[in-house]
Amino acid sequence: MAPYLAAVRNYWSLLPAIAVAVVLILLYAVPTLINPQWTTTVLGLFKQHPEDADPAGQRLSPKRIQSRRMLAGLLVVVALALVGFNISLNREANGCYQAATAWGAVEAPPEGNKKRTSDDPCITMIYGTFIGDGTGTVGQDKPQPVETYQLMGDKKPKYLKWIQNRPSYDDGDLLIGVEADCALDLKVEQLEDKITAVVDRAQPCPVDDEISLTAIKLKEPLGDRKLVTVDGKELRQINPDMDSWPTVLKKLITGG
């Protein structure tokens, strides 16, 4: 199970408390659903003087049996919701972590980069660009290359819902992600036969644990145009996204 649970924001630290709550709920709810009279009898044993209790008074009427079962059913739903909520939080965190690493974020910054990988990948490992939209002219004679892009298309990346300053699905047709320190220098030129993306700086972007995503709105449909960077090298298309619920459950069960 470790590989899937290794994402940096670890809500599984909440799991012991949730497990205790779920076990206590089920210890009451399951027998009550089967036969409410059982739990009434067992709970009666914990009274201060159980021998003085009137057996007739402990018998439940049909109406009380129905209400006890409804309460037990509600508690089971609450228990399942607690587990589902915890899994959902981890699905979100793992989705952001997987997307950030696919874009090139490193799990631990290299020596000399004093930034610390955060416990929350949806906030500090990957986010929408705060300043800059890819427009402007290139000033450097030898700009730096851009490596990857992602088409937004019909299948919108679900991880965008959770990242900080997320680009709207209507903001652009493609995403270009670069190291956070280089986001302001991203320049995208749309031509009739190609789209060129470069980082307008003399030195390569430092390896970083933060990726900034810029949404680019195409003036014309992409069609057969290629996305290229320095020296006409084609950008690599990636398609990171959050795991589906069946995939999440499978990984949790198998430890994949």
Image (tube, helix red, strand yellow):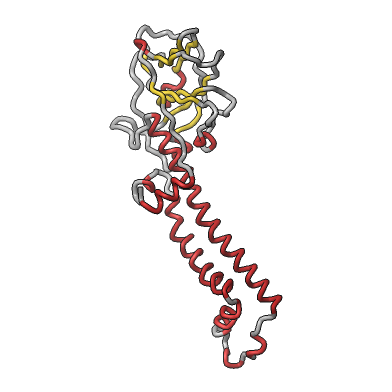
| Front residue of 249 and 28 | 249
From this view, report whether residue 220 is shown above or below residue 101: above
Q: Which residue is the extreme one toward the front?
A: 224
| 51, above or below 60, in the image | below
**Spot occupied by residue 75 in the image (x, y as percentages of width and height):** 58, 64
- Looking at the rendered structure, the number of numbered marks drawn on it comes to 0
Measured along the vertical axis of the image, is residue 74 above or below residue 147?
A: below
Residue 233 % position (x, y) = 35, 14
Q: Residue at x 41, y 49 (%)?
A: 250
Can you give x and y, in whole percent of width and height, for residue 49 in the image? 58, 90
Q: Residue at x 60, y 68 (%)?
A: 72
134 or 75, nearer to the observer: 75
From where the camera sits, is residue 35 visible? Answer: yes
The quadrant where residue 99 appears:
top left
**Rendering quarter of residue 58:** bottom right
Q: In the rendering, at what x and y percent does residue 165 appear? A: 54, 31
Quick check: can you spot residue 181?
Answer: no
Which residue lies most toward the right here? 63
Residue drawn at point x = 42 percent, y = 8 percent: 139
Q: Nearer the viewer, residue 243 or 175?
A: 243
Q: Residue furthest bottom?
A: 52
